[in-house]
């Protein structure tokens, strides 16, 4: 008798769960993909119009092979789903040459032979007048960087998973997870029609900033934080589109932010890094706007450093993200459980890597191993 396919419940289909469902379905697993909301929703971590992709990576050299693979997988998903998801508009890191982030980007590029260009303040002002640099500052340009489209990406990965046989269960909030005595799990979920249970051989937990609501994850150093983005109208919209404005990470004594070109509308998005990212226990309860103090401080940063924008926000977006204690993800077997894989705590940098994280999770579930060195992401490093 042929062996029945492995039945895997993926709990949480933000970008991480969606990519995992895609890869699992491609490997022939029978996938149930549950989410409390609909694909591409804006309550969690995977929304807000744009995300940065970059290869010269300040977060550590261990990520470079993962980023290379992720790039290939973004292109594969685009081709399979017939959707444009990644625009390689280049990426700037701007600031003082001795700022740790600028040193780290140059160091990682040198170590891995990545092409970068280093511009002094005058050269940067000529090429990228959208940014104001102080004397002595520099801009490092990574040509293999760009902007990702988060909502279409989640929807594309889930559409591919469904085309490959996955069963998508949006609006199914998981309320209980019980290990079955003989192996595998019973998953309880509330949906608009009532409560339902599902049996699975393996569960993948990818609940993003809701990690704190899962008793099974108590004890792991994960916390939700609120991240606020603000959009500012461009005076010359054409000069702020991706063909003229790379994504950017700005480091300056008065402000720090990531900056995204105009995509669908007429405004540039910034995500301030110098303003607080407060704890967010329940993403449902996040305020959907920002206080006047945030708006004033973000406006001051724009007035100082982005002269082509009207320095008053035209839109605010509030999102939540799960951070781990060391700001590296937890990816691997769930400590203390059988037949369970955890993907959590992406700490503000999971989007660009989501396709490769999903591929790694699918290998761990179906083969018990991965071709990549992910020991630095093992959830057991925290002693679980
Ligand atoms: C404002 C902001 C800017 C960022 N910028 C970048 C960037 O430029 N580049 C980059 O690489 N990364 C960036 N990140 C990080 C990246 O977006 C996240 O790491 C990534 O989106 C995390 O995805 P996730 O699937 O873990 O979480 P989510 O997208 O939050 O998905 C978790 C899912 O689990 C579901 N869920 C939770 N509990 C349950 C339950 N009980 N039952 C069923 N479903 C449940 C939720 O509904 C949700 O859909 C940024 C994050 C934020 C917030």
Image (tube, helix red, strand yellow):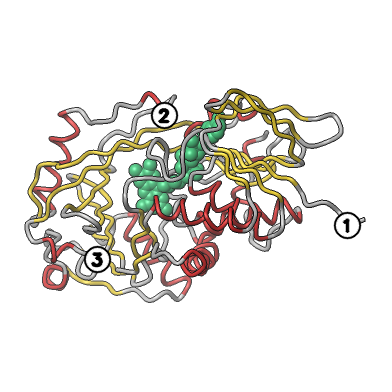
C-alpha distance separating marks 2 and 1: 44 Å
In front: label 2 or label 1:
1
- Residue 246 pos. (x, y %): 26, 65
Tell me the quarter of the picture where residue 337 sits. Answer: top right
Count up the numbered dots: 3
Q: Looking at the rendered structure, which numbered label has been put on residue 2?
A: 1
Return the residue found at the far right.
Answer: 1
Q: Quadrant of the N terminus?
A: bottom right
Front position in the image: 54 or 147: 147
C-alpha distance separating marks 2 and 3: 31 Å
Label 2: how many Cα within 10 Å (few below 14, some 14–19, many 20+)? many
What kind of element bears circle 3?
A: loop
C-alpha distance separating marks 3 and 1: 51 Å
Front position in the image: 177 or 60: 177
Label 3: how many Cα within 10 Å (few below 14, some 14–19, many 20+)? some
What kind of element bears circle 2?
A: helix
Q: Label 3 belongs to which residue?
A: 242
Label 1: how many Cα within 10 Å (few below 14, some 14–19, many 20+)? few
Which of marks 3 and 2 precedes in the sequence?
Answer: 3
Does the residue tagged 2 have its C-beta within 8 Å of any atom of ligand 1?
yes
Q: Quadrant of ligand 1?
A: top left
In front: label 3 or label 1:
1
Does the residue tagged 3 have its C-beta within 8 Å of any atom of ligand 1?
no
Q: Looking at the rendered structure, which numbered label has been put on residue 283?
A: 2
Tell me the quarter of the picture where residue 43 sits. Answer: top left
């Amino acid at each position: 008798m042929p062996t029945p396919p492995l039945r895997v419940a993926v709990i949480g289909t933000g970008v991480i769960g969606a990519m995992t469902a895609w890869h699992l379905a491609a490997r022939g697993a029978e996938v149930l993909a549950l989410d409390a909301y609909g694909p591409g929703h804006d309550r969690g971590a995977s929304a807000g119009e744009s995300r940065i992709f970059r290869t010269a990576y300040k977060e550590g050299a261990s990520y470079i092979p993962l980023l290379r693979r992720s790039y290939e997988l973004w292109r594969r998903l685009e081709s399979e789903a017939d959707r444009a998801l990644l625009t390689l508009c280049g990426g700037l890191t701007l600031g003082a040459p001795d700022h740790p982030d600028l040193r780290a980007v140059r160091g990682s590029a040198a170590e891995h032979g990545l092409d970068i260009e280093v511009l002094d303040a005058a050269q940067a002002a000529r090429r990228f007048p959208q940014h104001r640099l102080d004397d002595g500052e520099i801009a490092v340009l990574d040509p293999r960087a760009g902007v990702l489209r988060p909502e279409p990406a989640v929807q594309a990965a889930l559409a591919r998973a469904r085309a490959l046989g996955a069963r998508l269960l949006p609006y199914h909030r998981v309320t209980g997870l019980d290990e079955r005595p003989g192996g595998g799990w019973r998953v309880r979920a509330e949906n608009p029609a009532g409560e339902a249970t599902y049996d699975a051989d393996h569960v993948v937990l990818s609940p993003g900033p809701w990690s704190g609501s899962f008793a099974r994850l108590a004890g792991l150093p994960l916390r939700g934080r609120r991240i606020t983005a603000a959009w500012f109208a461009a005076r010359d919209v054409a000069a702020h589109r991706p063909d003229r404005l790379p994504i950017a990470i700005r480091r300056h004594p008065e402000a720090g932010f990531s900056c995204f070109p105009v995509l669908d509308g007429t405004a540039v998005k910034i995500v301030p890094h110098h303003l607080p990212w407060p704890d967010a226990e329940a993403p449902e309860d996040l305020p959907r706007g920002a206080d006047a103090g945030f708006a004033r401080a973000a406006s001051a940063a724009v007035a100082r450093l982005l002269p082509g924008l009207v320095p008053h926000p035209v839109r605010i977006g509030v999102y939540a993200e799960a951070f781990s204690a060391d700001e590296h993800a937890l990816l691997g077997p769930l400590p203390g459980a059988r037949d369970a894989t955890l993907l959590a705590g992406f700490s503000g940098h999971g989007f660009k890597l989501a396709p490769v994280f999903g591929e790694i999770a699918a290998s761990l579930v179906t083969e018990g191993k991965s071709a990549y060195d992910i020991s630095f992401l093992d959830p057991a490093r925290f002693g679980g």
